[in-house]
Image (spheres, rainbow, N blue to C red):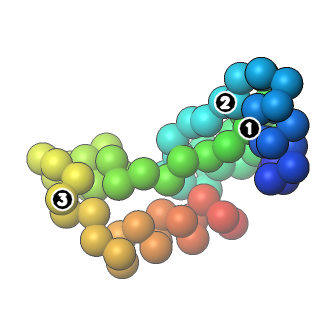
Amino acid sequence: MRSVLEFQSKKTQGEAISMITCYDTWSAKIINDSSIDSILIGDSASMVMHGHPSTVHADTEMMAAHVKAVSK
């Protein structure tokens, strides 16, 4: 996991900051062992993981479950 100061340093030095979307524990473990700087847990989980036609269906409860899974 990167610290806020590491992000600031990269920005100051003009370095790219990498981010990837993730919704589950196993993917998060793989990403954590990589050189990717940050993980986005987006509302697109409603479409990608739950099969909804849009992100409108991503409620707080759904997002909390994905945040919990990724943070493990």
Q: Distance between the residues labelled 1 and 3?
A: 28 Å
Q: Which of marks 1 and 2 is nearer the N terminus?
A: 2
Q: Name the residue under label 2.
A: 18
Which numbered tag is attached to residue 56? 3
Q: Distance between the residues labelled 3 and 2?
A: 26 Å
Q: Is mark 2 on a helix, strand or loop?
A: loop
At which x and y percent is residue 29?
71, 48
Q: Which residue is more in the foreground, 8 or 52? A: 8
Q: Do the residues labelled 1 and 2 touch (CB within 8 Å)?
A: yes
Q: Mark 1 points at which residue?
A: 37
Q: Is mark 3 on a helix, strand or loop?
A: helix
Q: Distance between the residues labelled 1 and 2?
A: 5 Å
Q: Locate residue 32 relative to residue 69 in the image: left or right.
A: right
Packing grade of label 1 (10 A; few <14, some 14-19, many >=20) is some
Q: Which residue is more in the foreground, 1 or 22? A: 1
Q: Which of marks 1 and 3 is nearer the N terminus?
A: 1
Packing grade of label 2 (10 A; few <14, some 14-19, many >=20) is few
Query: Can the viewer see residue 49?
Result: no
Is the residue 59 above or below the residue 26 in the image?
Answer: below
Q: Locate residue 29 relative to residue 41 in the image: left or right.
A: right
Amino acid type indicated by mark 3: Val
